[in-house]
Image: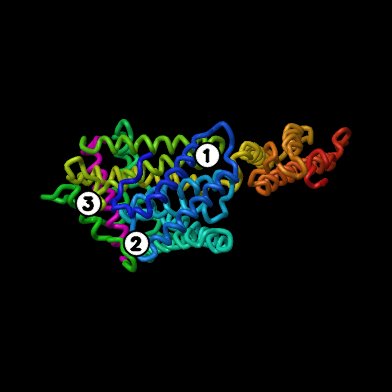
Amino acid sequence: MTDSPAVRVPLDPEEQPILDRVLIIRDHLSLLKGDRSTYVKSADVVKYHNQLVEQVEQLNRIRANKRDEQNRVDTVLDDCFRLISLFFLTIGRNREAPAIYACVSTVKRLLDHLVEAGFYLPADVKSIEEHLDKWEQTIIRGKDQHSEHLLTLLKARIDLCRATLRELKSPLAKLEGNMMKTYEKLVSILRSLSASNCRSKFPAQEVKEFEKQLLEIQAELHESPDPHEGKTAEEVYVERMAMVQICDGCTHSPDTVVKSLLARCILWVEIIQQKQGKIDPRFQEPFDKLIKVKRALEHMNLTQAWSLRETDLYDYQRSLDRVDESRVDGNFVDAEGKPADLHAQRTLLYLLRKSYAFIYQYIISSEPVSEALMPIYNQLLTLKRCLIEVKKSGGVDSPRELYPYSMKLNSIDNMKKDGKFMVGNDIPEGQSSVSALLAECFDLAYELRNDADDRNEENGAGNGLEQPRAQELNPVRAE
C-alpha cells in the first residue's frame, strides 16, 4: 500500500519500533478489509483500535517536546485510523468517536474544495454544519470511553472545518429572495456544465441549452454581454473569480455575488465549447484516474444499500488523496512542474470534489447496523417502502392482500433467539435499529388491515375468515 505523498522528515530512531508495529496493524486491517468470506466482528476491530491507541500514546510521550513533527509514522497512523473509522461504520458503531475520523477527514477535503471552486449551495453548507454538530456531540459522549489523544485530534479537526464553514457562509450572508433563487439556479447550471465537460462524448446541444438559459438570466438581470476583447475567456474567468474572493469575514453585495457567478458561467460555456471535452494531454493520466474513481463511486450509488461495505471507500479515498496532495500550491502540475491551464485545473478539481462528495454522502448515509444484519435490515426497508406505497395508493380491499407481507415479517421475526438477531453465537451491533424497523412494518401492516376491516364493515360486508389476527400481523405488539 502506498502512503500519501508528503514531506518526509528523518525518522527518530526511537519511533522506528512504533512505525514497525503500526505497519503490522495496517497490514492486518487491510487483510480484514479484503476478507469477504465472513462479516467483520466487533471484537477484531476493537482489538486493532486498542493496539493503535497504545502506539499513539507511546508516540506522544516520545514527542513531548516536538508536537508539530510529521513523518512517515503519522501518514501510516492516518491510514490506520481511517480504516478503523470505516470499520466502526461497518460494524454499526456509528455513534462512537472512532467512527467519525474518516467522516471529518473527508469533510475537511470537501470544504477546502468548495472554497477553491467558489460556488456551492446553502444546502451544502447546512448539511455539513449539521453533521459537524452531531459529530461534536459524539466526541463529548465518548470522553470517558475513548482515548483522550484521539478525541483531542478529532475536536481540532472539527474546529478547522468550522473555520472553513465560516468562510463559505460569508458570501451568501446577504442573499435572499429572487437573488438567492437566481444564485441557486446558476450553481445548478455550472455544475451541469462541469459534468457535461467530463462526458466521454461532448454534448454540444445540451451545452447550447444551458447557454440559452444563462443568456435569459443575463437579460433578466439587465447585464450587458462581456466581449472581453483582447483577453482570453480563461483570463477573464480568473478576474471574475477574484471579484468574489472567499475568506473569513468577507461580505459582498448580492449583486456582486450573483453577477460574478453569471459571468463565470458564461465564460465557462465558452471555454468548454472551445475544448469540446478534450483535456490538455499532459493531464490525461490524472483525468482518466479521477474519471474512473468517479464512475465507480457513481455505480456504487445504485447498489449501496445491498452491497456497500464502508471499508470499500478507503481505497477510493486514498486514491483521491494522492491526486489531491500531488498538487503544488494548489495547482495540478505536469512532469516538468508546469501548471495546468484553467480548463484542466477546473476540470480536475470538479472530479475531485464530486468524488469526495460521493464518499461524504455514503458515510453520512451509513446505518448504525452491523453488516451481518444488513441483509435483514435492507429487506425490512424494502417491506416498509412497499407498505407505505400500498397505504398511499388507498390501502387494500381485503386483509388477504396483506398475507405475503405478514408472512415475510413473521419469518423475519422468527429468526430472533431470545429477542435478539443472532449470527452463530454472536450478537451483532444494530439490534435496536432492526427491531424498531420490524415493529414499524408490523404497525403499518396492522393499520392497513384495520382500515380494510373498517371499510368492509361500512359496506356491510361480513368478515368471515378475515377476523383480526393480531398475533399473526403484529407479534411485536402481542409480546
Q: Nearer the viewer, residue 279 or 367?
A: 367
Across and down, in percent, residue 217 comes to: 32, 51
Q: Nearer the viewer, residue 32 or 277?
A: 32
Q: Amino acid at mark 1?
A: Arg
CA gap, disc 1 and disc 3: 41 Å
The residue positioned 36% from the left and 47% from the top of the image is 353
How far apart, in angstroms, are the residues tagged by discs 2 and 1? 34 Å
- Secondary structure mostly seen in the magenta stretch: helix
Measured in 3D between alpha carbons, the distance from the residue under mark 2 to the one under mark 3, in whole angstroms, is 38 Å
Dot label at residue 130? none
At x 45%, y 43%, the residue is 24
- Most foreground residue, 123 or 152: 152
Badge 2 is on which residue? 68
In percent of the image, x 30 and y 57: which residue is there? 221
User: In this rendering, does residue 286 appear at all?
Assistant: yes
Residue where numbered disc 3 is placed: 237
Give residue 21's position: percent from left, percent from top. 44, 47
Say what amino acid the circle numbered 3 marks.
Tyr
Q: Are marks 2 and 3 in contact (CB under 8 Å)?
A: no
User: Where does the image place residue 44, in percent across and percent down from the top left?
Assistant: 57, 44
Q: Determine whether the residue tagged by mark 1 lies in a helix, strand or loop.
A: loop
Which span is picked out in magenta? Answer: 252-280
Which residue matches tag 1? Answer: 309
Q: Who comes first in sequence, dot 2 or dot 1? A: 2
**Front position among marks 2 and 3:** 2
Binning the other alpha carbons within 10 Å of mark 2 as few (below 14), some (14 to 19) or many (20 upward) gives few
Q: Is residue 388 above or below residue 159?
A: above
Q: In front: mark 1 or mark 3? A: 1
Horizontal relation, residue 262 to residue 445: left or right = left
In the image, what residue type sits under mark 2? Asp
Within the magenta stretch, is there residue 265? yes
